[in-house]
Image (spheres, grey):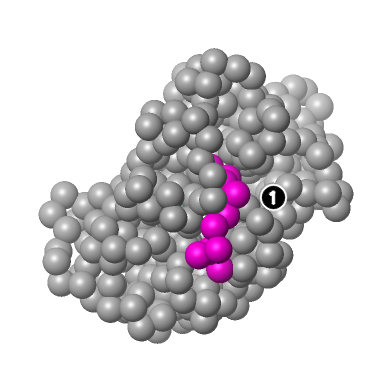
Amino acid sequence: MAKYLKVNSNNISKESLEYAVKVLENGGLVAFPTETVYGLGADAFNPLAIKKIFIVKERPFDNPIIVHVGKIEEVYSLAEYISPEAEKLMKSFWPGPLTLIFPRSSLVDDLITAGSNKVAIRQPNHPIALALLNTFGRPICAPSANLSGRPSPTKAEHVLEDLGDRIDLILDGGEVIWGVESTVLDLTGEIPLILRPGACPKENIEEILGKRVEIWRGKGENVPSPGLKHKHYAPKVPLYIIKINEEWKNKINNWIKEGKKVGVLASEEYRSFYPDGVKLVIVGTRKNLATVASNLFGAMRYLEEEVDIILSEAYPLEGLGLAIMDRLRRASYENSNWL
Ligand code: TXA
Ligand code: MG
């Protein structure tokens, strides 16, 4: 069983950090909070430790991992080339929820990049993550600390649930801030390309770069970010993205008549739309999509234990709404024709 340490973000205990660093130095796995979701960290220069990440998460080996750094300077040894645009973005958004793709240097292990010649790097903005990185003094590679395919962990209890018996240490720093993962941006091509929408909005990146940024929307084999072709974020019961209309109201009523337990991820604004008999979780308000993002994965994990079907409303495809809809589409992709 993983050792479980509660850590206070405002007063980080030195002993906990030193213990975590020992685990990493010995090739172990440490789950730690970042501002987006919990990460499952290993020494980025220890191939055996990196391999363990894939095994415990049951993650396909063709899905590369993000390297986390405590200081921007570390990027210069991990990347072969850093464009002026990348420098601008690092200055503007780091530490923060923006992952940048660079041509990799020979220091980066093949397992991390899944054999590709590019590496994904970010500097997380969480006091515990930064303290861990800077005490360790080397980069830490870390995917989200969930079993592959499951909703990402937004609190330490989620990590315990998925991986408690498979990893060495969980640093419990409470709930994360954003609740959706970082935006993954590839600057190595002609046009900046968002491979995964996330907590850093497209509009903010465009403002800093002064030009349009595209979102990768392809399908099939030619996938620039291999993680995108795997099933993701799925709760244990089917999830449907619904519309607020009479047709859906009837559908919900029919499910209830059939004796199905229906759970809803609802916004404050549409609370009164839903018929009696559904289990309602208000995830947040449409006036501030950060509230919705931060509750999304936790509410999926809660409802999957309580109901047979989960429903979610749709959100506008702008700002954080883009990341929210990306996660919902992936969680529901067999059940919705939104893709
Ligand atoms: O917010 C986050 O990004 C969290 C925290 C822990 O930092 N991490 C995270 O990692 O979400 P993970 O492994 O769950 O998702 C990483 C995504 C995957 O879609 C992966 O395919 C993509 O980033 N990725 C990683 N390295 C890549 C690379 N070299 N080229 C293209 N895509 C890459
Ligand atoms: Mg993940």
Q: Amino acid at mark 1?
A: Ser
Q: Look at the numbered disc 1 and say if its residue's Cβ is closer than 8 Å to ligand 1.
A: yes
Q: Residue 114: name its quadrant.
A: bottom right
| Percent coordinates x, y for residue 236 in the rendering | 66, 61
Pointer 1 residue = 225
Residue 237 occupies quadrant: bottom right
Name the secondary structure under disc 1. loop
Determine the residue positioned at 26% across, 58% down: 134
**Which residue is at the front of the view, 47 or 77?**
77
Q: Residue at x 64, y 30 (%)?
A: 192
Q: Is residue 259 above or below residue 281?
A: below
- Give the residues in magenta: 100-109
Residue that appears at 56% across and 68% down: 109
Q: Residue drawn 60% across and 49% down? A: 103
Q: Is residue 43 visible?
A: yes
Q: Is residue 103 magenta?
A: yes
Where residue 93 appears, x then y in whole percent? 40, 33
Can you say which quadrant of the picture contains the C terminus? top right
